[in-house]
Amino acid sequence: KAADDDDDNDDDDEREASSTIETIIIPPLKVNLIVPQVGFSSTMGKSLAEALERGFRSQSSALPQASPAIRVGTTESKSGSRFDISNKDLCDNFQLPPQSKQSGNHREVNYPEIILLMGCSSSSAGIEVDRNSGIVVVRTVLPVERSNELQRHLEEDTSRLLLSTLFVPLSNNGHRLESISIKLIDENPASHVTEGVNDGDDDGITAKVHFDIIGKALSSSVQAKIGPLLEELSFIYGGKIEAYSDASGMTERSAVKTENAMSLAVHLSAYLPLPEDFVELGKDDETTSGKYVSSKGLANWIHAHSHQPTKNTGDVEWILFVPSQDNAPLTVRNESNGGNGKSIILSSPQPAGGKMKNVYPNGMSIVDIPNFTGKVDLDLGQILSSYTVDISHSLVYLIGYIRAMHGLPPSTSADLSSLKYHGDGRENLSFWELESIARKLYSSSLETALFETDALMALLHQHAGTLALPTEVAHELNNATHLLRQSISLIEKGFPVIYATSLLHGSLQHLESVKNDHRFFELPYFAPDHYLAVFSPLVLPLLLPMIVGLVREVKRFRELQNKVDRC
């Protein structure tokens, strides 16, 4: 019953927090519509922008949780666009410029842009989305002269497809990612010993050489697959963030820089054999060959051999298990539905009630590496490349788990017949997925930043005369308030929330640095009666005999002086 009461209190706190957060209303997102065939700031361009905005407004009622309010405008000149579109006759041959790609830790603050190209051929008609920026290219077969049909097309079809695809509906129970730990366990490196490999050694690949190769393959695979994902998420979670303007002083060209805000650790171990009674042979009538192990038995086995540390809910630990050649290829079988796979989830990224249990590891994937025994004319580079491909394929399950932690689907889902993606692979986070995550985090992050700032300011006001505030601490506090003001300013101007959320988390990091600084404390102060209470028992026993002796000597000296005077 006590546990039930605690759960009820937690639910009440969550409802109270959610009701507070809901009071923060994010202004509409501003999107620029560029129509190169009719020029900038033309009457027709403004009419098309109004039609698209009406479509967004009417379509958003069907997707209230997924899509924000959108305000569509037009750029005043070519300089208002992110790049130059000078050829008005281009359509089928138009390509997104290379400068639209931005690194994960440096992004220019820009409004999203929708480029409308008219009079295209039916083969090129459709929507193309740049995954790395907020640029969308809409190609239509309708010519410029059919303005009424163009407006109806934008209002009814284009707006619906963009809202349903770009703004991803997120789960309500997402968690922030704080660290990733990947551990590869090689069941038996000696089973992968081969001969006849062109490595300059007649002994072929020894267990040590195999272990070194798989370690290099693990490092390169993690950096290639997980590194870009953490870089993109770090932009939202912040780091040492600063915003600046370009040489012309235009605030529209400001940028946000971040540093990696999450840790990534890779470990390698060996010689952890599977129990023989766990591994079973596949039946002849089954499509999968090799051996399999039950998901329940594998989960119990890995938990029994794993350390259960005390971690935060944002810490993810993932196991990559390389079976020996005697057990390869190895498949995980689900007893409940009979399904086969190469990965198991040990703790759900989206638990019921929004509470995640600290069960580690969070998941496990099987890595079946090829057997090179008996093959000749192979070098170590080919083996390293093969191992890297296999490990990279197994890391896809971890990427899906990280996406699920943030409420995203396992991979980008879209109707490819009408929507095309331009940029990196679909496993990485797109600009609009990051925007959806940022919109979900912004209200709660703003509440926290305002609360922490108010608490520090109240502390400074109440203890202004007795509180030590070194210059470095004051500088950190000034940076925190500066980033907070910039974040609110970007939101008010209608910029994407991804930039404002990044600045908010940067402000929170500066506030945390101020709170944890050992120099930020009250100056030592003791009342006089405290000094007497502490030092009297120590000093009085020493001073009292000295004072009594001094008084006696003074009296004796005076008596002697009087006798001398009489004589």
Image (tube, rainbow, N blue to C red):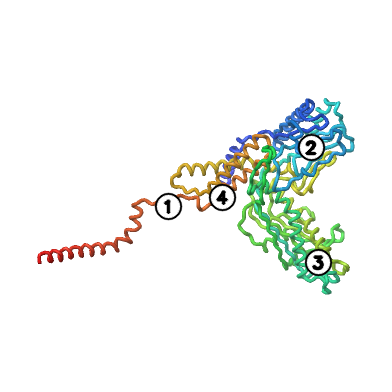
Helix, strand, or loop for circle 4?
helix
Amino acid under disc 3: Gln
N-term-proximal mark, 3 vs 1: 3
460 horizontally vs 133: left or right: left
Reply above or below: 289 against 108: below
Q: Nearer the viewer, mark 3 or mark 2?
A: 2
* Residue 276 in sight: no
Amino acid under disc 2: Asp
Q: Which residue is mark 4?
A: 513
Amino acid under disc 1: Pro
Between 310 and 450, which is closer to the camera in this rendering? Answer: 450
Q: Which residue is mark 1?
A: 524
Amino acid under disc 4: Ser
Reply above or below: 337 against 129: below
Between 426 and 304, which is closer to the camera in this rendering? Answer: 426
Q: CA distance from mark 3 to mark 4?
A: 51 Å
Q: Which residue is mark 2?
A: 84
Q: Nearer the viewer, mark 3 or mark 4?
A: 4
Q: Quadrant of residue 156?
A: top right
Helix, strand, or loop for circle 2?
loop
Task: Give residue 325's mark.
Answer: 3
Give the number of callouts: 4
218 horizontally vs 307: left or right: right
